[in-house]
Image (cartoon, rainbow, N blue to C red):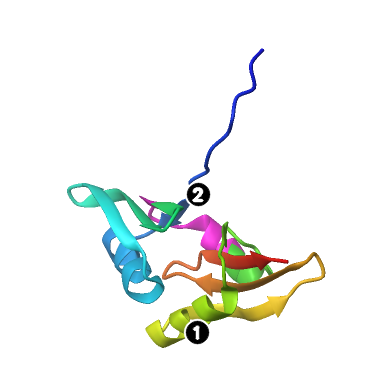
Amino acid sequence: MPDIALTSVVPILLVRDVPASAAYFRERLGFEIDFLHGAPPFYGSVSRGNACLHLRCVHQPNFAELAAREISLILAAIEVSEVDGLFAEFTERGATFTQPPTKQSWGGTDFHVRDLDGNVISFVTYG
């Protein structure tokens, strides 16, 4: 059997309002809006560099409620080349943080951002 390469993964965040969520990612985190699908939009995609997140409309984003109660319940992790510079950029853009840049015992440095629906995303640099 030939080796099959897995080339990427796209987390799907559950949100109440896809256009509002996409706008948050654009304005606060510097992502581009790739597409919004439906009328009104119920699915969409945002990306920055090689990182892509999909957004799916739900009436009650249950993972976000759980994330609000749990410490470090992260729904997506995005590896970045320079975590401190990105944190400074996001701070200037008015992002909502749940954790500032923190050197972890497992070797990475990360910070966490909470979106409009409570989804927590980690931005991490290893080494």
Q: Quadrant of the C terminus?
A: bottom right
Residue 125 appears in the rendering: yes
- What amino acid does circle 2 point to? Pro
Give the position of the N terminus as an image quadrant: top right
Residue 86 drawn at (x, y percent): 50, 76
Report the residue at 29% width, 49% height from top.
42
Q: Secondary structure at mark 1?
A: helix
For residue 77, which quarter of the picture?
bottom right
In the rendered structure, which segment of residues is drawn in magenta? 55-66
Residue 49, given in percent of the width and then of the height, sits at: 42, 58
Q: Which residue in the structure is indicated by mark 2? A: 11
Residue at image coords 52%, 56%: 62
Q: In the rendered view, tell whether residue 87 sits above or below residue 122.
A: below
What amino acid type should be assigned to the residue bearing mark 1?
A: Ala
Q: Is residue 59 above or below residue 99?
A: above
Q: Would you say residue 63 sits in the magenta stretch?
A: yes
* Element carrying mark 2: loop
Q: Nearer the viewer, residue 47 or 73?
A: 47
Q: Which residue is mark 1?
A: 88
